[in-house]
Image (spheres, rainbow, N blue to C red):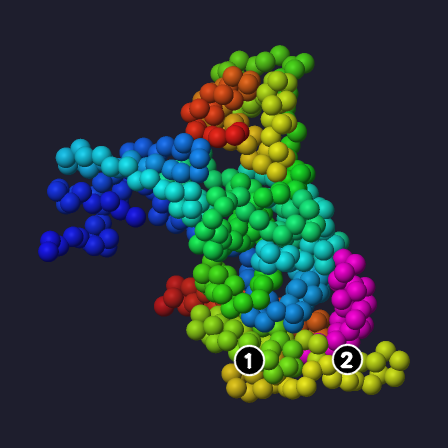
Amino acid sequence: MKFLCLDCDDVMAFAERQIPGDGTLAAVFTCGSCGREMAMLTNPMETQLVSSMGVKIGGREVPTQPMELARTSLEGGREGAFALSEDIPLASGEPPGTSAGEAATGRVVWTAEAAGRLERVPSFVRGMVKRIYTDWAREKGVSEITPDVMDRARTELGLEGM
Amino acid sequence: MRKIRTYQEVTHETGSDLLEQVVDQQRRLADRLVRVRSVVAVASGKGGVGKSAVTANLAAALASRGLAVGAADADLNGPSLARMLGVSGARLADRQSGVAPAQSPSGVRVISMELLQEEEDAPLRWREPGMGGFIWQSTIETGVLREFLGDVEWGELDVLLVDVPPGTDKIRRLLELVPDLDQMLLVTTPSETARFVVSKSVRMAREAAVETVALVSNMAGHTCSECGHVSELFTGDGANRLEEESGVPVWAVIPFDPRLGAATDSGTPLVISDPEAHSSRAICALADRVEEHVGIRTEDATEDAVEQGGS
């Protein structure tokens, strides 16, 4: 799908995506020559068609997760279908490492509060969600994941319902 | 009327990144399958011919002779492989590098939609906007099948069997994901109706230039357990006729045996619980043929590379 600015005969470039939460989607494209903007609005069916391909207009904020499409699209996923390959390392009872030290080794720990919040995520997608937060923290040099860190990551990554 | 440039004429990308993401999906799948020597589809086009039971028994037979075997249940709407191979309820280890498949007692690595669904009797449903399912359902199911093949940590495999649901469209779906499929086993019965339907699948496999295509004649006669008399379940000679018409060889003739169904119902394939049964022996003969053809494409490619390197 491409949008052509007819006045400039120039292809318009993706600029912004908005997901209002009602199943619709808005994608803004801009003409690099004249600066004209246009928004492509999709209805829920059209939005679903794109998401069924396992792609996101404008690119992904987080790397593709294993079986992401199945896990995010299946109705009635089995609780306990997926087992985390490692336990969640909790910070409680351990001295929290400094950001530099922990991040240098790539080790990220979860506080009990953050782990509790993660526990409320359906287990069908919990491993995937845990990885997304952990990767974000590691990338930012954050060694300890707290509810506040989760909120920051969620906002920055545009994660809904995680 | 003004001339508007066509899509192909506009070579500059929009930055929407859609095409790149699709290409990345294909690359992930190809990267995963690099470690699989042979991808073998067990298909038919026709329903009710015993594809899944053949797949489960064939997988167990191949694994029992020391091959590394995976089994992917491409029948998302009517999954049965997990049950037949005895891994119902198994948990899948969730790793960054992929989802670890369930391991059957017979040593087969399994992925099936059954392992992902909470309720046993729940039909497959996707989160949806409530309309237009006919437009995107095939797209999402193709995507999930791609994940079954590409996001599962199969490891090194000699054979990855894919149990393909009825319908030639499902065969095409697999061929789009795995265009260099190594083998396609087309399961049929002696019935004329099955021959009629499976002939379409033969043509599709031929047009897709699948390396090796073979027929499996299932439910070919019933042997009385008391007197040994063989009686026909179907009138007709569908598999042989199809072989004559198409030139596609019949690799196995599997007699009907109620114990085959009972064994797969219990999660232990008959080739494991009773390897001497007539149908088990037929499936083991089929395993011989499949094994003979494992890695032929890879070996051919290696030989070509050696020849080119030496010339």
Disc 1 with disc 2 on a shared chain: yes
Kindly identify the residue that appears in the image at 15 percent across and 36 percent down. A33
Kindly identify the residue that appears in the image at 58 percent across and 58 percent down. B74
Q: Which image quarter holds the N terminus of chain B?
A: bottom left
Verify CB contact (< 8 Å) between mark 1 and mark 2: no
**Residue A98 picture location, percent across and down:** 53, 13
| B308 left or right, relative to A146 | left
Segment colored magenta = B252-280
Residue B109 on the magenta span: no
Corner quadrant of residue A60: top left
Badge 2: few (under 14), some or many (20 or more) residues near its Cα, within 10 Å? Answer: some
Kindly tell me whether residue B189 is visible in this rendering.
yes
Kindly tell me whether residue A103 is visible in this rendering.
no
Disc sitting over residue B102 in the figure: none
Q: Amino acid at mark 2?
A: His
Question: In the figure, B191 relative to A103: above or below?
Answer: below
Corner quadrant of residue A147: top right
Kindly identify the residue that appears in the image at 38 percent across and 66 percent down. B308
**Residue B303 picture location, percent across and down:** 46, 67
Judging depth in this view, the residue of B289 and B124 nearest the camera is B124
Helix or strand or loop: what does disc 2 sit on?
Answer: strand
Q: Earlier in the sequence, mark 1 or mark 2?
A: 1
**Residue B8 picture location, percent across and down:** 23, 55
CA–CA distance in space, label 1 to label 2: 22 Å
Q: Which residue is mark 2?
A: B222
Callout 2: chain? B
Question: In the figure, B266 relative to B92: above or below?
Answer: below
Kindly identify the residue that appears in the image at 64 percent across and 81 percent down. B191
Disc sitting over residue B196 in the figure: 1
Q: Amino acid at mark 1?
A: Phe
Question: In the figure, A135 relative to B22: above or below?
Answer: above
Corner quadrant of residue B45: bottom right
